[in-house]
Amino acid sequence: MLTQHLLSLAIWLPIVGAVVVLATGGDARAALARRISLVVSILTLLVTIPLYTGFNVQTAAMQFVEGPYVWVAAFNIHYHLGVDGISLLLILLTSFTTVLVVIAGWQVIQDRVAQYYAAFLIMEGLMIGVFSALDAILFYVFWEAMLIPMFIIIGMWGGPNRVYATIKFFLYTLLGSVLMLVAFLYLYHHAGKTFDIRAFYDVRLGLTEQILIFVAFFAAFAVKVPMFPVHTWLPDAHVEAPTGGSVVLAAIMLKMGAYGFLRFSLPILPDASHELAGFMIALSLIAVVYIGLVALVQEDMKKLIAYSSIAHMGFVTLGFFIFNAQGMEGGLIQMISHGFVSGALFLCVGVMYDRMHSRMIKDYGGVVNRMPVFAAFMMLFAMANVGLPGTSGFVGEFLVILGSYQTSFWIAFLAATTLIFGAAYTLWMYKRVIFGAVAGDKVDKLEDINGREVLFLSLLAAAVLVMGLWPAPFLDVMHVSVDELLRLATTSKLSVAATAAVAP
Amino acid sequence: MNTLLASLGPAAPEIFIFSMACVILMADLFLSESRRFVSCGLALVTLVGAAWLTLRHFGAPVSAYNGMFVGDLLSDTLKLAIYLVSFFVIVYSRDYLGARGIYRGEYFVLALFAITGAMIMVSASHFLSLYLGLELLSLSLYSMVAFQRDSVNATEAAMKYFVLGALASGMLLYGLSMLYGATGSLEIAVVRSAIAGAAPTNMILVFGLVFVLVGLLFKLGAVPFHMWVPDVYHGAPSAVTVFLSSVPKLAGFALFMRLLVGGLEGLSAHWQQMLIIIAVLSMAGGNLMAIAQTNIKRMLAYSAIAHMGFMLLGILSAGPNGYGASMFYVLVYAVMSLGAFGMVILLSREGFEADQLEDFRGLNRRSPWLAFLMLLLMFSMAGVPPTVGFYAKLMVIQALIDASLVWLAVLAVLFAVIGAYYYLRVVKLMYFDAPADTNPIAAGPDVRALISINALALVAVMPWIGALMDLCARAIKSLGVA
């Protein structure tokens, strides 16, 4: 019984848990709220693990399918869930990250604790919903509903400029999403009145239609990724968000945009994707090169990591739009790896911020003298961010560069510059913050990380190393699904549409 | 004689409410100030009784008074919604009225008269009965707005409302007379078939249509006939505003259905284009002007203008799909507006009106539960899932795409994003700012319970949305024109 509803359980368990957490009331019972949240997040992680162990790597079909149960009969909207090799890892990443976020906020959040944890748990459920929805409207509901808790998290527990950042974040993402909704409705009317995402794959569309829909999807997904011209909300949101919020934003929410390209844009609009691939590749390379340079001059650590996220996500979209298996798998691996690494780096900044209440690089220096264990952990994550072989960062970047080399030398060349820029901005920051002489009284009084911090940092360190040294378990599950996706993305719909137009 | 008696049955709810209004008027004379709750209770009992009367023959198609009055699923559904909304309004208003010394029986009597008027509009199948219902509703509303007679704002609002409302009624009447001239009948069904036989370019018909439309849009408060809306919403006591913002919208929608769709659907090529302009102007004007407001009642008034523009989108897509979408939209809007103004009432207390946006500052610190309810209301108005406001917008947009008006759909969602800004601002004030006012919130447990039901319904209804949409679709079908 339960095994048939694993996905529903993973979605609704945290949401119900959030209601229970909220019911604990004010800060007087904060300890109880924390414990319940931890239990709920660990239970959710346990629920998602069977998805991996029971996953059949031989098929591209959706697995653990639930439904379709009729939800709104008049419009053929269904409650319909399932996972394939593309969404599986993202779901696991979500449940894993949430446990870390819960642990990370344990002592830091002292104000309106129940609301804080409830917001994160609700978000976990909604994010798993996004990755497992097979009905476009269900997908949209999860996708949009997530904005509400994130809006609250940034606005309530964020930094000084949080209100500006959170409203900008909300409106930016809402603007993108509503256009996607119009595109969904257009597809609905052309797919024989159904919102089944896989039915959209078979809709015959002309090139102009495809390009217009691509633009609508682009508005939604590119904002979330975020891609080059529409990335400006991210540094603001990241800088102002509390540590947990930054981690969830970087590790999971950014992945949803990339996931959207894979689930919607590429298979539904193969011709437009090819037509506009040059444009997408150009934007991705701008993100890699230009944003890499922007990251170099940042004085705020969180902002630096935010820009580095944009650059790394540029790699992901680059991998998707060169249309070969290496690129796509590299992009996917890069997504997961970036989830670990950026999450870890934000947690590292959070660890220092909790002690110093500053994110400015100039306030630091010589931290290694007082926090040697922490410095070692951060070294590992910095190296992973650079893409050092043996860490998870290497696998994805290497595959993407390999893939793009098949398309064009110059694309691969520009993409490879990330290894230089990434090393420059990450290691330079690391040097200024960690090494050198002790920079002042406040640094002098720093205490090394405690057991709780060691716990979440070592979990992440293990993930980064395992993925870097032995990526096979990650690659195996996505192989067949990626091949199927590539088949869809490279089968033109135009000839079919042309014959359909001729035949009465 | 026989037909008159036979006609009493279908109109039983109207007759019952009207009689009870007279009973309350009389009984109230003999009640002391401390026993005023009897009038209030009687009014609530009246609504429940009327609901029972309506439910007894729910959805049964009837025609009475020689075809001047019809009952069908559309009218019965809207009537039930009117009872429900009014029930909440009366409970919300009680303490508010008491704190301002205007807790009088006349409030309930006027409200019941207004409800009767709205019900007659909903059931009208003849220009005469339609106009009669409209005037009964409007006249009751004018006096309700002026109910707090020592308030300058309220009196001014009532005056404006009355003058502009009378002008609108005149326009409508003039338009109806032209239609009568062109078709030779006041009966909507006859007008319909006469139009079907007439040339679509018949000047008198088109002229009549324009005047009728102006009258209707005035009543609905769409741009450019919206001038009265913010002033009246703002000036009227909140207990009246909450009524004003919900019940007449339901009746107004019925008016569009009966008159425009039931009677003038043959001219849809004309009114579709007019409504496109009006809808775009309303969404643009309402949403943009709402941003500039500091008074929440005014902000919600502009938001009402924008919402009515959005609702018109469904009607102008000129198909049963779109009408059903608009019906769903207006029902949802009535519930949202009820809750939002209910919250304004709830935060007010003796000698203090919580009508500034600032008054919501830090509400999450004062009462997390109420802040959460207001958050649901605001996100629902903004149309963010999982709230029902999203599904309402979804339906309207899909009707537009169905009618191949994709550009209008894109425009509509863009305005919805602009609109999201000022709803977000309320959430921002409640959650991110420190409270300026730390007085305890003086609201009774019954009001708290009802507003909780009101706001939670916006999310809790999720699993039954399909059934509700289906009900709207069937109600439109019962109109017999689709």
Image (spheres, coloured by chain):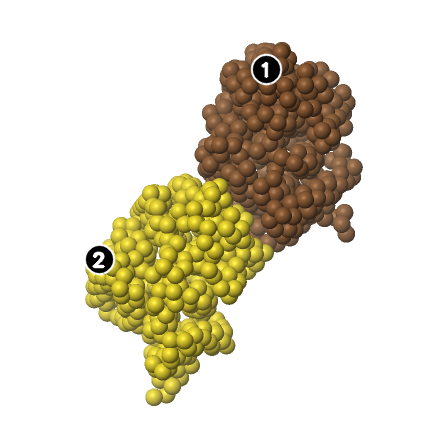
Chain colours: A brown, B yellow
Number of other residues with Cα within 10 Å of mark 1, as a class: few under 14, some 14 to 19, many 20 or more: some
Label count reads: 2
Mark 2 residue type: Phe
Given contact means CB atoms under 8 Å apart, are the residues at marks 1 and 2 in contact? no
Measure the C-alpha gap from mark 1 to mark 2.
82 Å
Residue B207 marker:
2
Camera-nearest residue between B429 and A421:
B429
For the residue pair A36 and A75, the one nearer the viewer reads as A36
Q: Is residue A264 found left or right of B57 in the rendered image? A: right
Residue B55 horizontal side relative to residue A339, left or right: left
Give x and y (percent) for residue B223.
Answer: 29, 50
- Image quadrant where residue B110 sits: bottom left
> Residue A439 has which mark?
1
Residue A168 versus residue B364: which sits nearer the camera?
B364
Q: Callout 2: few (<14), some (14-19), or many (20+) C-alpha neighbours within 10 Å? A: some
Position of residue B291 measured from the top left corner of the image (x, y, whole percent):
36, 43
Residue drawn 72% across and 48% down? A5
